Image: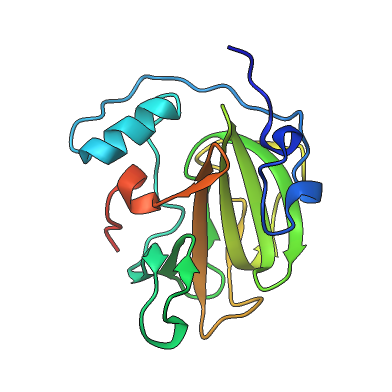
Amino acid sequence: MTRRPLAARGQASHGIRAALHPRWTAPFTCPYSIRGLSAAGAVALLALGCQSPQWPVDGQLASPFGVRSGGGLGELHRGVDIVAPVGTPVRPILDGRVRFAGTMRGYGQVIWIDHGDDALSLYAHLSEISVEAGEPVRKSTVIGLSGESGNVTGPHLHLEVWRWGREVDPVQLIGRPQG
């Protein structure tokens, strides 16, 4: 099976196509157990090459993935929001390579990471970016600091996970945050 990058297939949305360089990929490894994950999380983990994902920051889930109720009634929330004070170190959910580090409308300062095999993660509303496009990152790498840039109501980290051009609920992949 030949891997074709997301941007090359034209499946990127929200104006990110130009930001996502088509040739960067990162290898996956499989030294971790899937025990304790939900069935959906285990399937997602296996599909992502078996790395054991982690939450990028410690904190409580403020806004879950899915259709919002209340003020954003009917609006799809493509990721999760994790409460984190401004300046909290942010680490990637998996090893990968930075595809984009800069500003996106509404999201403020963001980082896109390519985890290989058509899997991407987005970290938004950062106060500081510590990496550059093309740079390889490990799960232990501090890629930036949480903040409140872009359209926000308070300090938090917005995390999105994309697989095959579609958003994935991070909780299904990683489990519930412990913060």
The residue lying at 36 percent from left, 19 percent from top is: 31
The image shows residue 177, relative to residue 11, as above or below, that is below
Q: Quadrant of the N terminus?
A: top right
The residue lying at 73 percent from left, 70 percent from top is: 105
Residue 2, percent from left and from top: 64, 14
The image shows residue 151, relative to residue 165, as above or below, that is below
The residue lying at 39 percent from left, 51 percent from top is: 170
Asked if residue 142 lies left or right of residue 23, the reply is left
Q: From this viewpoint, is residue 137 visible?
A: no
119 or 26: which is nearer to us? 119
Asked if residue 38 lies left or right of residue 150, the reply is left
Q: Quadrant of the C terminus?
A: bottom left
The image shows residue 23, relative to residue 72, as above or below, that is above
Residue 123, percent from left and from top: 57, 57
Residue 106, percent from left and from top: 67, 73
Q: From this viewpoint, is residue 61 visible?
A: yes
The image shows residue 25, relative to residue 100, as above or below, that is above
The answer to which quarter of the image holds residue 9 is top right
91 or 162: which is nearer to us? 162
